[in-house]
């Protein structure tokens, strides 16, 4: 299944059946972080934004399978801190699973009176204690020099097994370092908050198997759909803006 739905996230989520998605990847509006984007400045107050988020998250959790995971992006870009309150509320209303830091590798929004922000957060919620999670799917390769050094360690008797272990790489931590997309990046398709496909692929790879369904209620430029296609996952994506729907269609047709 590959389904692109044009419409409002909450309305479209309400039409979906219970427990069909193995993973939800949601990168919603942040609330007044991107001041030039009308989709990010839709709410009169932070409380109105929080209430809206709590409604769509409740629907997304209904659509999630019992062993599924929901990944919800948020950032504190220019000192807006609605996401701190949102995380706290959502962690009380649902089961908290993890808080991932997306390390963008370079800073953004130069502040004069504090350190330059370099990360965004991804709150991870679950529905039960038994979740599908494949740690082997996301490993960080060791460089050749490190492998060479480790192989000199004589404590290991079975060097073939040791080499296989080192070649597989180390387990990823919950600080995922994936460089944000530069203006000149070939991957960029023109959306102001496009996420790197490598980052979204890691989230999909660890939380789903081939054939599982991934749901993204705020598809934007279609990153989740593109990642799902390349990993042989099914997907449903919702996006309200017709211009972004066109962007998604042309992105997917050039895959
Ligand atoms: C942060 S962006 C998502 C970017 C996406 N992750 C990517 O990699 O391209 C949020 C998206 O949500 C869309 N959006 C805002 N309000 C919406 C709503 N009520 N229903 C559906 N989509 C909405 C915006 O048009 C925007 O494209």
Image (cartoon, grey):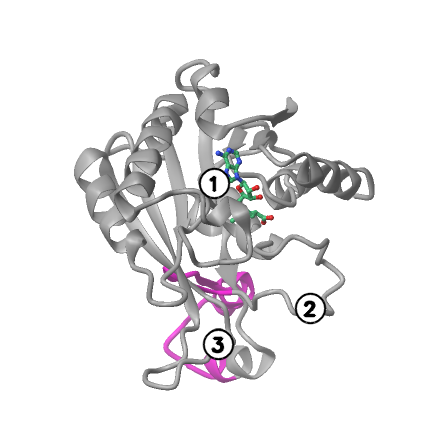
Q: Position of residue 159 (x, y in %)?
A: 50, 70
Q: Which residues are magenta?
A: 149-177
Residue 205 visible within the image: no
Residue 154 falls within the magenta-colored stretch: yes
Ligand 1 resides in the quarter of the picture at top right
Q: Earlier in the sequence, mark 3 or mark 1?
A: 1
Q: Position of residue 53 (x, y in %)?
A: 34, 37
Image quarter of the C terminus: top right
What is the number of callouts on the image?
Answer: 3
Q: Position of residue 171 (x, y in %)?
A: 42, 60
> Is disc 1's CB within 8 Å of ligand 1?
yes
135 relative to 106 in the view: left or right: left
The outermost residue toward the right is: 254
| Foreground residue among 236 and 97 | 236
- Label 3 and label 2: CA atoms lie apart by 14 Å
- In the picture, the disc for residue 183 is 2
Mark 1: which secondary structure? Answer: strand
Instruction: Name the residue that disc number 1 marks.
Output: 25
Camera-near label (2 vs 1) is 2
- In the picture, the disc for residue 107 is 3
Image quarter of the N terminus: top right
């Amino acid at each position: 299944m590959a389904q692109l739905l044009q419409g409002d996230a909450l309305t479209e989520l309400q039409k979906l059946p219970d427990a069909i998605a193995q993973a939800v990847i949601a990168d919603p509006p942040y609330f007044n972080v991107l001041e030039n984007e009308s989709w990010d400045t839709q709410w009169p107050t932070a409380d109105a934004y929080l209430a809206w988020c709590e409604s769509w998250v409740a629907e997304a959790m209904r659509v999630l399978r019992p062993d599924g995971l929901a990944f919800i992006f948020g950032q504190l870009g220019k000192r807006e801190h609605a996401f701190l309150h949102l995380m706290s509320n959502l962690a009380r209303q649902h089961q908290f699973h993890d808080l991932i830091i997306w390390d963008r590798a370079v800073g953004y929004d130069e502040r004069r009176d504090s350190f330059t922000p370099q990360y965004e957060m991804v709150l991870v919620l679950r529905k039960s204690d038994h979740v599908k999670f494949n740690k082997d799917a996301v490993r960080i390769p060791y460089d050749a020099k490190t492998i060479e050094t480790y192989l000199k360690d004589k404590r290991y008797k079975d060097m073939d097994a040791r080499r296989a272990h080192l070649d597989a790489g180390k387990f990823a931590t919950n600080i995922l370092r994936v460089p944000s997309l530069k203006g000149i990046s070939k991957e960029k398709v023109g959306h102001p908050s496009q996420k790197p496909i490598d980052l979204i692929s890691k989230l999909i790879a660890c939380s789903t198997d081939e054939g599982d369904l991934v749901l993204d209620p705020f598809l934007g430029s279609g990153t989740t759909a593109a990642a799902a296609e390349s990993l042989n996952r099914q997907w449903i994506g919702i996006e309200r803006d017709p211009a972004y729907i066109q962007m998604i269609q042309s992105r997917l047709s050039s895959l």
